[in-house]
Amino acid sequence: MHDYIMVSIACITYNHEKYIADALEGFMMQKTDFKYEVLIHDDASTDSTADIIKSYEKNYPDIIRPIYQSENQKTKGVKVGTFNRQRATGKYIAICEGDDYWTDPDKLQRQVSYMENHPECSLCVHAAYKIKADNKKMMRHVRPHQGDKIFSVSDIIRGGGGFFATNTMLFRTEYEKTKPPYVTGGPVGDYPLAIYLATRGDVFYIDEFMSAYRVGVPGSWTSRMINDA
C-alpha cells in the first residue's frame, strides 16, 4: 500500500438525497493497493444530501473530504467542479457526480494499473450502463467499442458528447492544471475535457461495464436540455 494518495475522486452534488448513498458506497467498496480520497462538493442542497454525506464523513474521516456550501455557487455562475479538482492531491482524478455510481469494486485498480504501466496514456475510460433514475432499470448502455481500444482525437470528436460516460473518466491530475479555455469555458466540461486529454496522450477504453449513469434525474443537465428543447 502506497503512503501517498494515488486517486482523487471528484464528486459534485446538489439535492441528490435519493442517489448520493449509491455514489458513496461505490467509492468505498473499491479494492485497491493504493490510497484514494473522496473530494465531494455539496452546493447548498436543500434536502438531506449534506446529512447523508456527513454520516459517511464520520465513518471514513481519512477518506471523505467534503465542502458544504452555505450558498448555491452554480446559480452564481461558478464552475463547481473546480472546487474539487483544484484541491486534488492524487496523481489521478476520477470523476463521478452525485447522482451516478460505480458498480465494480475493481474499477479504480484496473484503470490505475493500466495508467501506471502506460505513461503515454492521459485518460482511461470504460463502458457504463444507462439506467432510469427512479428504479435503476437499464435503458441502454454507453459502449463505444466492442473490445478494448485506444481512441484518437478524431474518434472522440466524431463520437460526440455522449461517447464516454463522465463517471468512467480517470485522468492524470497534471493535465488539470493546464486546461485551455475551450475546456473550462463551455457549458459542459466532459466532452471538451476528453478531446483535450486526447491531445496530450492516448485515450484507453476498457470494454467492461463498471459504472451506472442515471437518466432522468430532476435538475440534471440532460433533463434540462430535454425540457428546453
Image: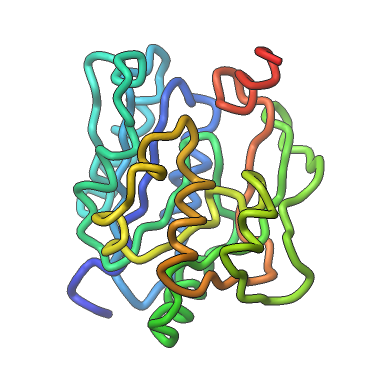
Q: Residue at x 57, y 64 (%)?
A: 153
Q: Which residue is drawn at 72% across and 39% down?
A: 131
**191 left or right of 229 in image:** left
Q: Quadrant of residue 216?
A: top right
Q: In which quarter of the image is residue 67?
A: top left
Q: In this view, does 21 lie above or below 50?
A: below
Q: Residue at x 35, y 58 (%)?
A: 93
Looking at the picture, tell me which residue is in the foreground, 199 or 108: 199
Looking at the picture, tell me which residue is in the foreground, 71 or 86: 86
Image coords of residue 49 (percent x, y): 40, 25
Q: In which quarter of the image is the C terminus?
A: top right
Image coords of residue 69 (percent x, y): 24, 22
Q: Is residue 42 above or below residue 111?
A: above
Image coords of residue 20 (percent x, y): 47, 34
Q: Quadrant of the N terminus?
A: bottom left
- In the rendered image, the residue lying farthest to the bottom is 117
Colour scheme of the picture: rainbow
Q: Is residue 32 above or below residue 131?
A: below
Q: Which residue is drawn at 43% across and 78% down?
A: 115
Looking at the picture, tell me which residue is in the foreground, 87 or 50: 87
